[in-house]
Image (cartoon, rainbow, N blue to C red):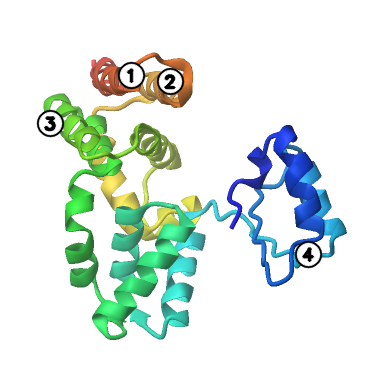
Amino acid sequence: MIRAGQDIRAAACTVFVPFLVEPTEGTVIVLQHAGGAKGKAVLEAARKAKALEIACTKLTRSDERADFVRAEIRRAGGRVAPDAVDALLDAVGSDLRELAAVSAQLVSDSGGQVGLDLVRAYHRGKAEVSGFAVADLAVTGRTGPALEALRFALSVGVPHVVIADALADGVRSIARVASAGRGDKFSLAKRLGMPPWKVQRVQGQIRGWSEPGLRNALGLVAALNADVKGVAADPSYALERAVRGLSTARQTAAN
């Protein structure tokens, strides 16, 4: 299994491509490639060798990921309650491989019926230290608890990038729901492509934010994305600074 085939270096291609075109007998090569121009030579070599190509469209909307989870659970021979799907997405995130693996495990552990209580029990430890837990505290101005949750999450190995993505998602969700105006969670969920439970949660987080504050916050999480991917010398400090910055943006917006 070759993951991230687009990242294979040019020097390695001279060795790998001939083996890809004519593998040894009894060898099966699975090549994962993100598409695009990067590492295109490897992809073209696989196509030239008439390899079986399976295109996987990126799922960007929450309702698409929910459909994916339901399909995976059905494929494993199980059934899932609607609120359990929402809880699973909240706990696991958007990584489809992890969602597929967890879905199969839940079906196996439950005997086929996946409910909310099982999902909560299965992910209780993880949810308590997830990036989303940090984000929920940060965007509502609870800086102290947010920093405490952040340090705990880092101490147990939650990646910097995952926490930064959760902070960005929290700010963007508030901006989207705020700009959509008033409405019940179901009508707004349909318009925004978000699950109703998330719309309801974000509606409770909007208080204290205004347009100038959200603009500042959006700029802050955009810079944080670069910081945790190599720009900042200390990504942990960059995350702490971002959490404090979100509090400042929210306070400025409230005045």
**Identity, as a three-letter code, of the amino acid under mark 3:** Pro
Which is nearer the N-term, disc 3 or disc 1? 3
Residue beneath disc 1:
238
Which is nearer the N-term, disc 1 or disc 4? 4
What residue lies at 63% left-to-right and 54% top-to-bottom? 32
Residue 155 location (% of width, % of height): 20, 34
Label 4 crowd bin: few (<14), some (14–19), many (20+), radius 10 Å? some
Residue beneath disc 2:
227
What residue lies at 84% left-to-right and 64% top-to-bottom? 50
Marks 2 and 4 sit apart, C-alpha to C-alpha, by 39 Å
Residue beneath disc 3:
145
Q: Which residue of the protein is positioned furthest toward the right in this rendering?
A: 48
On residue 51, which mark appears?
A: 4
Marks 3 and 2 sit apart, C-alpha to C-alpha, by 23 Å
The quadrant in which the N terminus is found is bottom right
179 sits left or right of 152 in the view: right
**Identity, as a three-letter code, of the amino acid under mark 1:** Ala
Q: Are marks 1 and 2 in contact (CB under 8 Å)?
A: yes
215 sits left or right of 200 in the view: right
Q: Are marks 3 and 2 in contact (CB under 8 Å)?
A: no
* Quarter-of-image position of residue 85: bottom left
What residue lies at 33% left-to-right and 35% top-to-bottom? 163
Total numbered labels placed on residues in the image: 4
**Identity, as a three-letter code, of the amino acid under mark 4:** Ala
**Identity, as a three-letter code, of the amino acid under mark 2:** Asp
Marks 1 and 2 sit apart, C-alpha to C-alpha, by 7 Å
